[in-house]
Image (cartoon, grey):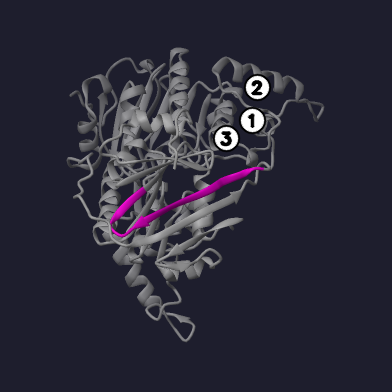
Amino acid sequence: MAETTNKPTKANESEYVIEMLNITKEFPGIKANDNITLQLKKGEIHALLGENGAGKSTLMSVLFGLYQPEAGCIKKNGEVVKINDPNDANMLNIGMVHQHFKLVECFSVLDNIILGVEPNTAGFLKKKDARKKVLDLSERYGLHVDPDAIVEDISVGMQQRTEILKMLYRDNEILIFDEPTAVLTPQEIDELMRIMRGFANEGKSILFITHKLAEIMAVADRCTVLRKGKYIGTVNIADTTPQELSRMMVGRNVNFKVDKQDMEPGEVVLEVNGITVPSKLHKGNSVQDVSFNVRRGEIVTLAGIEGNGQTQFVYALTGLDKPTAGSIKLCGKDITKMAIRDRSKMGMSHIPEDRHKHGLVLDYSLEQNMVLQKYWDPQFQSMGFIKFDAVREYSERLIEQYDVRSGQGPITMARSMSGGNQQKAIVAREIDKDPELLVAVQPTRGLDVGAIEYIHKQIVAQRDAGKAVLLVSLELDEVMNLSDRILVMYEGEIVGEFDPKVTTTEELGLYMAGAKRQER
């Protein structure tokens, strides 16, 4: 395996379209980038790999002008450049698709694409030419969008296409993708990989931040690995393996297989009977007459392509939405109309799909988020007054136990943490509640392989301790590895039940696509 050292190459500097040389960036309590060098060749897809909090997004934010480094310089085509803000980056033909999209939700797709570079004559907005350019670009690159659709009404995959078209509209040649597949379905991921290869074939240069080793092996030419803010090495993808990349990333061998013993499920913990949830987008139902149960000592997985009712079902189950028919029982007690806090007290934990909307209060500190569902316990309050020392001690224990990395420990603002570490904080809080039922929705979304391995062990440990686990996942590898039973959901209905020991991903795929269904 060929590795480079943390020094600029001696070759002709014009070989590289972008060079970030010896970049150092610090925040209070943490050195996010410590003397990092990254070199991007023209027309290549260059992956940036690292654990949650390794400094990947920070490095790309430096290149895009969102942060100013304490040390180091940036070169474009061998010439030193100064990037003070994203406008400077755009002038240098550098564009970025952020992990959490930067779109105005009440604007149309077209308005978001042209925002900041609006075509005008004498101050009057002229959208006709802009619309034609956007439609031409979407046709050319297979990024089909409705320019008049309002952003808050379109899917996550469509929002990402809008972000990509923003870059293309500005004629960007250096494209930064920050965790672009974290919120996409498998089909959308395949589509994005195809689009990225097309960009590279046209001579565009791509920096691609991801945790997913399979994607790096499939699409990247080279990969630079960071660990805890430091440069580890750069490798040619043709000369390496997923195992070697994961070892560089986390500093040890990672077990890609989930180890779990056979279990004999116990009594029923969750009983769902005929749950129906109306759609907010059309006149029909998002969830139609869904019934199943989850017993102690088993992991039941709800699998399906995104948009087939899983989200709406979980909302009804956890109290975020109300079903129009059916009942939900937890440990034999009807909780269908129970408040969210009462469900939590009854023994339900929920790792939500959207960590920003339902998992965290972003402007609260990490320690405040850790006790969001327990602050009223005598452990944390007396006569209505919070015991701040107890909150601090409790959060410090969870931070250490779950390796939640944050610049200022328990007093760190949740908003300032990396997406992966935000996710680890939620998982820590929900599992530590010692629930009777753990509802885990996309629990490893945005996590690196080391963190995924750890979270999987925690979920299996809950099952082995006699808890009931309902997992909702789009990741087929995760579904096959963790599940004791698999339920496939298609268009709001359960269309099949499977034993992962005797089924295949191909078989599951047919049911997920609606090509087959079982009579229940």
Q: Which residue is mark 3?
A: 159
At mark 1, the secondary structure is: helix
- Percent coordinates x, y for residue 174 in the rendering: 47, 24
Residue drawn 30% across and 54% down?
298
Do the residues bearing badges 3 and 2 touch, measured as CB atoms within 8 Å? no
Nearest to N terminus: mark 3 or mark 2 = 2
Q: Which mark is residue 134?
A: 2
Residue drawn 27% across and 55% down?
458
At mark 2, the secondary structure is: helix
Of residues 274 and 447, the one nearer the viewer is: 274
Do the residues bearing badges 2 and 1 touch, measured as CB atoms within 8 Å? yes
Q: Verify whether residue 361 appears in magenta.
A: no
Nearest to N terminus: mark 2 or mark 1 = 1
Q: Nearer the viewer, mark 3 or mark 2?
A: 3
Residue type at the position of mark 1: Ile
Which residues, given as a range, are shown in magenta? Answer: 284-300
Q: Which residue is mark 1?
A: 113
The secondary structure making up most of the magenta span is strand
Of residues 179 and 79, the one nearer the viewer is: 179
Q: Is residue 464 left or right of residue 505?
A: left
